[in-house]
C-alpha cells in the first residue's frame, strides 16, 4: 500500500483550495533498467476528489504526470470543517483513499 | 478419515463462496483499474488522433486559456509545473498535451459545475516542446499552446 497523500484544504474567500501531493512512482514504461529490460509502466490512472458526496474533480492521468504527483484546484461550496475525500487508482488496480478537513 | 472429510468440506465451501462472489459481480477481473480510463486517447501520438479519441473535432485557438506557473525554460523535464486557467464559459474539462512526448496526452481533468476551471499540476517532458491546453466548453474544443524549453529530459534515461 502506498504512502498516504498529503492534502491541504483551505477556505479562500468563498472557494476551497485543494492542494494534494500523492506518493507514487509514476513509472512511464519507457525506461529500461541496467539489464536493458523495459521497466513496466506503473502510474495513477484515475483521481477523484469528492466533497459531501459530490465529485468536485475527476481526472484521468497518463504516465506523463510527474513522480509523486501534485495537483491543485479550487471549488465553491465548501465550508470549514467539511470533509474532502480523494481517491486514486493506478494501472495495477491499487487504490488509496485519504480524507482531509477544510480549514 | 475424519480429517480428510473436514478438508474436503472446507475447500468445497471455499470454492462455492468464491464462485458466489464472482457470480454476484464483486470480483470482476481487472475491474478495479477499468474505472473510465480512456486508453485510446492516452495511446495517441498526434493532436488529430487525440481529438478523435476524445470525440471532438479540430479545436479552435483561444486566447481565453491562460497558462500560469508554467516556466519558459524547465531545468528538469521530469518535473515541469503546469497551470491552466480557462476563461471560457461552461468549461467542462481541461486536458494537458505535450507535443513531443511518446504519447501526447498527459492528463484530463473533468470540471463539474462549481469547480473553478483552473488546475495546476506537474508533468514530465522528454524534450523541449509545445504544451497544449485543450479545453472542452459547452461541447466545443478550444486550444492554447505554450513553448517550453527543457534542459534535461524527463522521459527515459
Image (spheres, grey):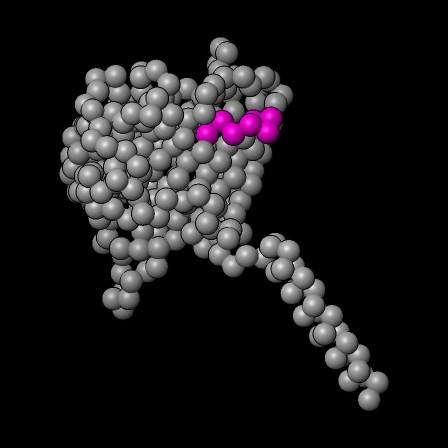
Taking the view exactly as shown, the residue that stands out farthest to the bottom is: B1
Residue B141: give x, y in percent of width and height. Answer: 27, 27
Q: In the rendered view, does B109 fall on the left or right side of A49?
A: left
Measuring 35% from the left and 21% from the top, which residue is drawn there? Answer: B138
Tell me where residue B17 sits by quadrant.
Answer: bottom right
Measuring 41% from the left and 30% from the top, which residue is drawn there? Answer: B110
Measuring 37% from the left and 18% from the top, which residue is drawn there? Answer: B90
Tell me where residue B151 sits by quadrant.
Answer: top left
In the depicted structure, whether residue B33 falls above or below residue B146: below
Which sits in the foreground, B45 or A6?
B45
- Asked whether A32 falls inside the magenta stretch, the response is no
Q: Which residues are magenta?
A: A51-57
Residue A91: give x, y in percent of width and height. Answer: 42, 52
On-image quarter of the C terminus of chain A? top right
Q: In the rendered view, does B54 fall on the left or right side of B145?
A: right
Would residue B117 be seen by someone viewing this image from the given angle? yes
Residue B68: give x, y in percent of width and height. Answer: 28, 22
Residue B116: give x, y in percent of width and height. Answer: 41, 19
Which sits in the foreground, B94 or A72?
B94
Would residue B70 be seen by someone viewing this image from the given angle? no
In the depicted structure, whether residue A66 falls above or below residue B67: below
Amino acid at each position: 500500500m502506498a504512502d498516504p497523500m498529503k492534502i491541504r484544504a483551505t477556505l479562500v474567500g468563498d472557494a476551497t483550495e485543494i492542494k494534494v501531493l500523492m506518493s507514487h512512482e509514476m513509472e512511464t514504461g519507457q525506461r529500461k533498467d541496467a539489464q536493458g529490460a523495459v521497466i513496466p509502466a506503473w502510474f495513477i490512472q484515475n483521481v477523484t476528489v469528492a466533497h459531501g458526496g459530490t465529485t468536485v474533480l475527476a481526472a484521468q492521468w497518463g504516465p506523463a504526470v510527474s513522480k509523486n504527483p501534485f495537483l491543485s484546484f479550487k471549488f465553491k461550496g465548501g465550508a470549514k470543517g467539511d470533509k474532502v475525500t480523494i481517491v486514486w487508482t493506478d494501472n495495477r488496480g491499487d487504490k488509496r483513499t485519504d480524507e482531509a478537513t477544510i480549514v | 478419515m475424519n480429517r480428510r472429510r473436514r478438508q474436503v468440506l472446507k475447500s468445497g465451501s471455499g470454492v462455492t463462496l468464491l464462485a458466489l462472489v464472482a457470480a454476484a459481480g464483486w470480483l470482476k477481473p481487472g475491474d478495479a483499474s477499468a474505472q473510465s480510463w480512456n486508453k485510446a486517447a492516452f495511446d495517441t501520438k498526434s493532436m488529430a488522433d487525440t481529438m478523435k479519441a476524445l470525440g471532438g473535432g479540430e479545436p479552435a485557438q483561444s486566447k481565453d486559456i491562460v497558462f500560469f506557473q508554467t516556466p519558459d525554460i524547465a531545468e528538469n523535464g521530469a518535473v515541469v509545473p503546469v497551470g491552466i486557467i480557462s476563461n471560457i464559459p461552461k468549461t467542462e474539462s481541461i486536458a494537458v498535451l505535450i507535443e513531443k512526448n511518446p504519447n501526447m496526452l498527459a492528463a484530463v481533468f473533468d470540471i463539474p459545475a462549481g469547480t473553478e476551471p483552473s488546475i495546476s499540476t506537474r508533468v514530465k517532458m522528454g524534450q523541449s516542446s509545445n504544451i497544449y491546453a485543450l479545453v472542452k466548453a459547452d461541447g466545443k474544443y478550444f486550444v492554447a499552446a505554450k513553448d517550453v524549453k527543457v534542459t534535461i529530459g524527463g522521459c527515459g534515461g
